[in-house]
Image: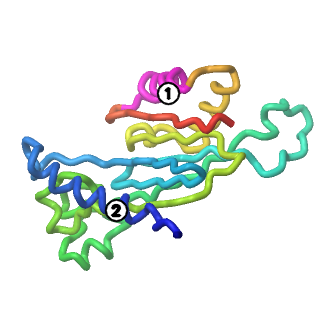
Amino acid sequence: MRRPHPAPRAVACSSRLQPTLTVHLPAPGQDGACAVAVWVLQELVLVANVGDAKCILARAPDRPTPPAAGAQPATQSKPKAIVLTKEHTALIERQRIEKAGGTVVNGRLAGRIQISRSFGDAAFKKLGCSAAPDVTAFPLTARDRFMLLGCDGFWGVFGAQEAVDTAAGLLAEGAEPKAVTNRLLNLAVREKKCKDNCSVLLVSFGG
């Protein structure tokens, strides 16, 4: 018997989480959070996100590029950054928000919050703020090296390819995933001067 696709289960989990947070948050009308989650089910990978947290896949090229003059060998097959999540902001989702009866003022939902999907934020749920995730599914390949999951503070100062290049370089030197994320956070906060919440997680596929 063919198993049902797991993506609807991810959406169902999200729908259960929203009312739970509304009950337990100290200020459910004002508190809210974005999220990105990954499920690795044998050879199938699912990525679900709500808000502006992102997941980036590092995938090696199908065929190594011919060496350029003077290029180092390590540069021939560096992984490419692939964005797996959709950003949910009021500007991007204006049409959906207005269809739900909400407004977008100065690039913000109801003139208040920039994101258009989140958990919590109960005061904005009737104004078009949704807790429904976007779900992406793809088959894991031998070329997939790792994924980086991070909040908007991290991605606000790090480009996707820059983060992948930095992480790949550290892994090639033998660094453990935890040491790689610590280094990325130090770069984001101390050198790139991130002033927002800053978090990043590395999921290695051992490639």
Depth order, front residue of 193/67? 67
Q: Taking 85 as reference, is 23 left or right?
A: left
Q: Which residues are magenta?
A: 177-194
User: Does residue 188 show up magenta in the picture?
Assistant: yes
Q: Is residue 116 magenta?
A: no
* Percent of width and height locating residue 75: 78, 35
Q: Residue at x 58, y 35 (%)?
A: 204
Amino acid under disc 2: Val
Q: Position of residue 16 (x, y in %)?
A: 22, 57
Measured in 3D between alpha carbons, the distance from the residue under mark 2 to the one under mark 1, in whole angstroms, is 28 Å
Residue at the spot of label 1? 181
State which tag comes first along the sequence, 2 or 1.
2
Residue at the (40%, 62%) spot, across then down: 134
- From this view, report whether residue 42 is shown above or below residue 9: above
Q: Which residue is mark 2?
A: 11
Q: Residue visible at 27% across and 54% down?
A: 118
Considering the image in quadrants, where does the C terminus appear? Answer: top right
